[in-house]
Image (cartoon, rainbow, N blue to C red):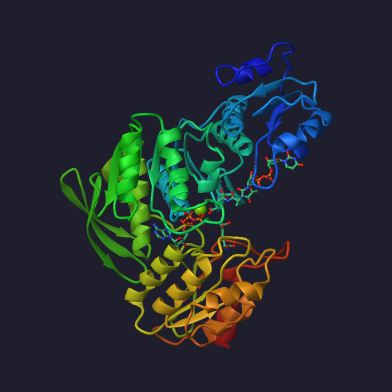
Amino acid sequence: MKLSELARGLADCPEGPDPEVTGLTLDSRKVEPGFLFVAVPGAKTDGSRFVKDAAERGAVAILAAAAAGEVSVPTIVSADPRRTGAQMAARFFGAQPDTVVAVTGTAGKTSVASFVRQIWTTAGKQAASIGTTGVVSPTRNDYGSLTTPDPVDLARLMASLAGEGVTHAAMEASSHGLDQSRLDGVRLAAAAFTNLGHDHLDYHPDVESYFTAKMGLLTRLLPKGAPAVIYSDDRWSGRAIEVASGSGAKVLTVGRNGSLLTLKRLEHERDRQIAEIAVDGSIHRIVLPLAGEFQMANALVAAGLAIATGVSAVEALEALEHLKGAAGRLEKAGMTSQGVPVFVDYAHKPEALENVLAAVRPFTTGRVIVVFGCGGDRDKAKRPMMGEIASRLADVAIVTDDNPRSEEPATIRAAIMAAAANATEIGDRRQAIRTAIAQSRAGDTVVVAGKGHETGQTIAGTVHPFSDHAEVRAAIAEAGR
Ligand SMILES: CC(=O)N[C@H]1[C@@H](OP(=O)(O)OP(=O)(O)OC[C@H]2O[C@@H](n3ccc(=O)[nH]c3=O)[C@H](O)[C@@H]2O)O[C@H](CO)[C@@H](O)[C@@H]1O[C@H](C)C(=O)N[C@@H](C)C(=O)N[C@H](CCC(=O)O)C(=O)O
Ligand SMILES: Nc1ncnc2c1ncn2[C@@H]1O[C@H](COP(=O)(O)OP(=O)(O)OP(=O)(O)O)[C@@H](O)[C@H]1O
Ligand SMILES: N[C@H](CCC[C@H](N)C(=O)O)C(=O)O
Ligand SMILES: [Mg+2]
């Protein structure tokens, strides 16, 4: 594609040569001959420092916030090179599934994206989901790393999904992804907001900026008049509704206070919940085959997105009866010989831990035993908050390691322990899981939180293979001998 074609309507092309562009990237180290290099400011450095490096590797054009005098290749200047770069990436790769929806919120994104895919599939659509646990479509199940991929990877992925015949895609919009305009080239049919809690305040200066980054999905990316599905029962729901309607979205609320789908009654059983949901004046009784009230919230948001994109309400609600939970989200990883269920869950932030411990309490006649830790090189304020929640809501709390990354693991544990009265500290996660399971007895519930679907433990730059699921199974086998 010619540079002028790539830039048309997005940014002004400089006078002079109009090279053929064969690819694009935000990382000079990935430049190949014929590429456009998108130079963006980052947290650690500024891409515009690598313009020369990019040109030496064969870049034929640069997109940057200011013209760099040090290279002879044409430079397109944009006030917002991240956004313009994402839009160019979308144009370069072309096709996208006809119907793409995105969900944001502190918790529930992965679950909602997976649920929407499942509802669409039940309704006969060729559907995909994109997020923390990877990309799932009728033809693939690829493990992922970022929640919201880099804009170039995302545009390439959208085109390849469309090429495979996927017509419907549900994706997660992380606050990092929104802040860095990673999705700014995606054509959205609808968007959703689940909730706002404490996370990533190492990246965003304060809660307001974190909220504003999330709201970018509704204010900047969602076309005017398109549906915005908003969970009605979060502390931040009112603000989100205000922002969405203020920017011209068609607001659809779901939840106990919802108008599209109103949750009238909810009854919890051990592995399922029975709900009465009002829609269009009639009540539907559904059995959701998942534990935890938060899963009901996620299911309602997902049904809202499916309805917003053309699935009938009856069909969407019926599909909820067959939902499978996303991997590692309050997933029963095993049961001990005494009948103690052991759940693996991805709670690595305060509200998630609180919800998960509250979710298992109704069906636990004995003690709730939790094993958890906090990630290194991530928001440190979460540590005492999670310590306090575990000691308040669990009967037995074991504090262990969860991806210490470059930090000293004992320091992370100490910050949690300082607020976790009566908790036990066992750094080795394998040992912590074994200790929890070995002391469990009939009536108890064990929750292993923080890693969910993850398959590694990152310590000082090395990823050691580690699976909570596998460790739970091994510990149960050992305890049963
Ligand atoms: C904190 C964060 O989001 N960082 C992202 C950010 O990097 P940065 O701001 O640190 O970039 P930088 O190192 O300052 O460099 C600035 C620019 O110069 C470029 N560069 C740098 C060096 C060089 O030699 N040449 C060169 O071109 C870099 O590629 C970059 O584009 O911009 C980069 C692309 O421009 C992203 O790849 C990078 O994501 C990293 C990989 C990351 O780990 N992000 C995580 C925290 C993340 O995004 N997580 C969210 C949320 C998770 C959740 O809660 O679900 C996610 O969506 O996964
Ligand atoms: N609606 C919800 N409200 C509160 N907590 C939730 C909700 N949904 C999920 N959780 C908790 O958060 C954890 C992560 O859920 P999920 O992966 O669906 O969210 P996410 O927003 O994608 O998270 P991440 O940003 O970490 O990828 C779950 O394991 C559970 O502990
Ligand atoms: N996307 C999240 C994942 C956290 C998972 C948890 N296991 C941890 O390492 O803190 C983050 O990067 O903050
Ligand atoms: Mg996620």
Q: Is residue 13 above or below residue 139?
A: above
**Quadrant of the rendering where the C terminus is positioned:** bottom right
Farthest residue toward the left?
281
Q: Residue at x 61, y 67 (%)?
A: 467
Q: Is residue 449 above or below residue 477?
A: above
* Left-right relation of 98 to 176: left
Q: Is residue 354 above or below residue 30?
A: below
- Dividing the image into four equal quarters, which quarter contains ligand 3? bottom right
Q: Residue at x 71, y 37 (%)?
A: 47
Farthest residue toward the top?
16
Q: Position of residue 91 (x, y in %)?
A: 58, 25
* Left-right relation of 295 to 331: left
Would residue 403 be visible to someone looking at this image? yes
Q: Residue at x 40, y 55 (%)?
A: 323
Dividing the picture into quarters, in which one does residue 39 lie? top right
Would residue 289 be visible to someone looking at this image? no
Q: Is residue 126 above or below residue 402?
A: above
Q: Position of residue 193 (x, y in %)?
A: 39, 47
